[in-house]
Amino acid sequence: MNDSTLAWFCLRSQLKHEHIAAAQLRSRSNVDVFVPRIRFKRITRLGRVWVTEALFPSYLFARFDWSVSLRQIYHSPGVSGVVHFGSHWPVIPDGVIDELRELLGRNEIHVVPEDVTPGDAVQIAGGAFHGLHAVVARVMPGAKRIEVLMDFLGRQTAVEVDLGMVTKSTNAREPILCADPRRPAA
């Protein structure tokens, strides 16, 4: 197949089925697939657990010859459609995919660091304060504890909690989507 006829397209997958669509498409020799993912800790009823999700929920990227493979791609298990606007089928530049791949690494997974610093918004997992939001006031790395400020019983209260009982409250996707790969990390 001529490389000049191959292009990257954005595909819509069924909800939470990006990995299924990717596996089906990867089984075809003429399709290159890219599913950027993030791994982070989330608070559940069981406490903090690691989760892996698509960076772009319900979307993935595939490189194929539109004129030859569109029908086959469109009807692949897990794929609910190819993103298009009327009769316009936008192509994603190779450079955009290359930058995302460089940012996420070989495994296509970005692990969101779980370190906290004073001023970070956090959510508490487990214990009497499970589910409450707080702000980190002080980190005590030797004791693996932090002091947080939270609104409790109508006033702001300082509480020490185990470092393993908190997770950042920020959107895990935001640091990746807003990152400029040409600019060194702070």
Image (cartoon, rainbow, N blue to C red):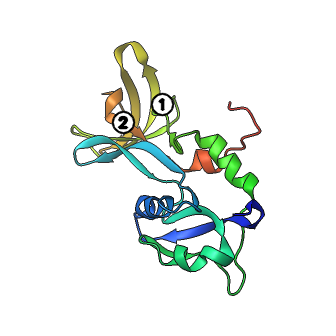
Q: Mark 2 — residue?
A: 166
| Label 1 SS | loop
- Residue at image position (50%, 58%) is 26
User: Which amino acid lies under the numbered mark 1 shown in the image of this protein?
Assistant: Val
Dividing the picture into quarters, in which one does residue 96 lie? Answer: bottom right
Q: Quadrant of the N terminus?
A: bottom right
Mark 1 and mark 2 in contact? Answer it, CB < 8 Å.
Answer: yes
Indicate which disc residue 77 carries: none
- Residue at image position (36%, 27%) is 163
Q: Position of residue 106 (x, y in %)?
A: 56, 39
Dividing the picture into quarters, in which one does residue 153 lie? Answer: top left
Q: Mark 1 — residue?
A: 116
The answer to whether any part of residue 65 appears in the image is yes
- Residue at image position (58%, 39%) is 105
User: Which amino acid lies under the numbered mark 2 shown in the image of this protein?
Assistant: Val
Q: Position of residue 167 (x, y in %)?
A: 40, 39
The span from disc 1 to disc 2 (Cα, nearest Å) is: 9 Å
25 above or below 164?
below
- Residue at image position (76%, 37%) is 183
The answer to whether any part of residue 160 appears in the image is no
